Amino acid sequence: MEKGKGVMGSGRRWAVDFTDNSTAPSSRDIPDPPGFTRASIDQDDSALSKQKKDAEANWKSQKAWEVAQAPFKNLMMMGFMMWMAGSTVHLFSIGITFSALWQPISALQGVGKVFEPYKDSKVELLGPKLLFIALNLGGLALGVWKLNTLGLLPTHASDWVSSLPPAQEVEYSGGGIPLH
């Protein structure tokens, strides 16, 4: 057997030819029954495809809202972990705090990539994106609050003493010699 003849050759045993070369009347010549039009089939197909597109758009919208609400779970978990870490400065609490800061920042940088699979002309993504951003900003605020409770943010005047000018002297005092 020659290479390729067994599979692609013209001598197939089970090939069926669907071309109609006969002169007998075919099914195309038979009139449609009363009330049936070929256009209605096309309309049904378009209605079915429209339903499929609407269902797909609805599914994409629902999934986009689920993705937008996902940072809330992370927010609750991170809040619990920060509460368990305590308010003393040690390696574990600092690691948890910086993780709480890093996750929202990296999520905010990739908002477009997160919602890319749900982009469609029928799906409105503004609401889910705004919720996603708001929840991640809440997570960022939680991390900044934890930094403040650990005393790692310079919020007191004593944190800035080195940058303050020295106080101006108001009095001079000398000892031991009376000045009359």
Image (cartoon, helix red, strand yellow):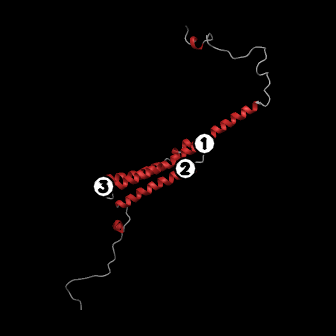
- How many neighbours does mark 1 have within 10 angstroms: few (below 14), some (14-19), or many (20 or more)? some
Vertical comparison of 149 with 28: above or below? below
Q: Quadrant of the N terminus?
A: top right
Residue 177 image-quadrant placement = bottom left
User: Residue 74: x, y in percent?
Assistant: 43, 49
User: Residue 148: x, y in percent?
Assistant: 38, 61
* Mark 1 or 2, nearer chain start: 1
Q: Residue visible at 33% across and 54% down?
A: 85
Work out how far the residue at label 3 is from the one at label 2, CA to CA, in angstroms.
37 Å
* Mark 1 or 3, nearer chain start: 1
Vertical comparison of 98 with 149: above or below? above
User: Residue 135: x, y in percent?
Assistant: 48, 53
Query: Which circle, 3 or 2, is nearer the viewer?
Result: 2
- The residue lying furthest to the top in this view is 1
Vertical comparison of 177 with 132: above or below? below
**Residue at numbered disc 1:** 57
At label 2, the amino acid type is Pro
Residue 89 image-quadrant placement = bottom left
Residue 88 image-quadrant placement = bottom left
**Residue at numbered disc 3:** 90
Work out how far the residue at label 1 is from the one at label 2, CA to CA, in angstroms.
14 Å
**Residue at numbered disc 2:** 128
SS at mark 3 in the image: loop
